[in-house]
Amino acid sequence: MENRPAAKHILHSGYFHPVLRSWQCPNTTVRAESLMLPLFIIDSDDEVQEIPSMPGVFRFGINKLKAFLQPVVDDGLKSVLLFGVPQNLPKDGQGTNADSSVTPVIRVIPKLRDWFPNLVIACDVCLCAYTDHGHCGLIDSEGFLDNQASIERIARQAVNYAKAGAHIVAPSDMMDGRIGAIKRGLTEAGLGSRVSVLSYAAKFASAMYGPFRDAAQSAPGKGDRRGYQLPPGSAGLAARATLRDVEEGADMLMVKPGLSYLDIVRQTKDKHPEYPLFIYQVSGEYSMLIHAAKNGVFQLQPAVEEVLLSMRRAGADVIISYFTPQVLKWIKEAQN
Ligand code: PBG
Ligand code: ZN
């Protein structure tokens, strides 16, 4: 008798059945609502391009998008995050084609609203894909980032996406004061109550964005982004940046990248439990899992499911993931 565990130390009795196991994992279920799909929209309307560094992910021309999205929406897709990838439109110092009437994001929003009336449309707001220097903000004559000019330009971009019909604008540029500038812009445009601001609040300068810069063709020409994206070791700056964005009126918060920053997710959720928290499983995280599975390291499905579950457990409400179409299929299969 002596070496038998005490009753309260017997744990198996709490999770011997799948339903009991689900009770032990509150808020870790990944549902369709917990997923947002990033989409790359190009300015060649009839083209589909596979992204070499992200097997299974494509850039779409506007005329090819509906056929791709229809089955994903049928599988339960609730929300998308749009990135414009201009390949023909010229880039310039002001990022003019970030929100010109001919740019793919502006043109595709009304179509998406028409094709899929229940789909939530979020737009990434940033200048890096549209500027000739490839930085996320505007550069002054001496080559320095001009914060004030940047946030004024980014607020205009956000308002123009909102006017085109975006439900959510999501600034990823990391300039100081952009949330306040965007909120003021939306209010002045009469859209203050109808458009959400999802702040990339704690966005770190990460090696994991490599494949994205290939996907979005948005690598900076000179220098890097360490002057505006957060240093990966700094939980302190993450907390300050998030608090600032909350004070400026952000509706929802994000931590990015995902897997290497789950402590930041927990810290953010604990500090700001009132706010929906997004986590971005970025391009490099996607490619790592895809390549590991392709090389026989593990099976893709259980590995992806475990990673997504860990993000929910850390406190994320919504996961932005390139795996979304695949995961929606898995969710559906599990229900049948
Ligand atoms: C650009 C932007 C980046 C990502 C989203 N918006 C790249 C960067 O900051 O260099 C990364 C997304 C990904 O890697 O999947 N503002
Ligand atoms: Zn950018």
Image (cartoon, grey):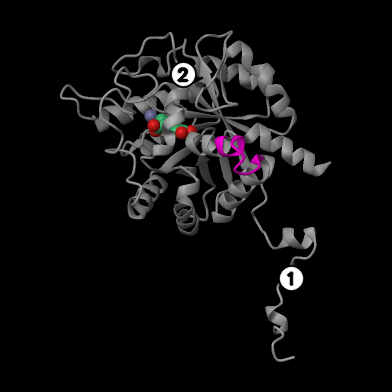
Residue occupying the far front of the picture = 296
Q: Is residue 297 magenta?
A: yes
Q: Is residue 173 magenta?
A: no
Residue 116 in which image quadrant: top right
Q: Amino acid at mark 2?
A: Val
Residue 336 drawn above or below residue 159:
below
Q: Quadrant of the C terminus?
A: top right
Residue 328 position within the rendered picture, expressed as x and y whole percent measured from the top left: 70, 36
Callout 1: helix, strand or loop? helix
Quarter of the figure with residue 12:
bottom right
Q: Which residues are magenta?
A: 291-300
Residue at point 35%, 36% (across, down): 178
Q: With 330 as the anchor, is 190 left or right in this view?
A: left
> At 43% from the left edge and 18% from the top edge, which residue is drawn?
99
**Circle 2 sits on which residue?**
85
Label 2: which secondary element? strand
User: Which residue is tagged 1?
Assistant: 12
Is 59 positioned to the left or the right of 210 in the image? Answer: right
Query: Dot 2, how many residues are within 10 Å of its Cα: few (below 14), some (14-19), or many (20+)?
Result: many
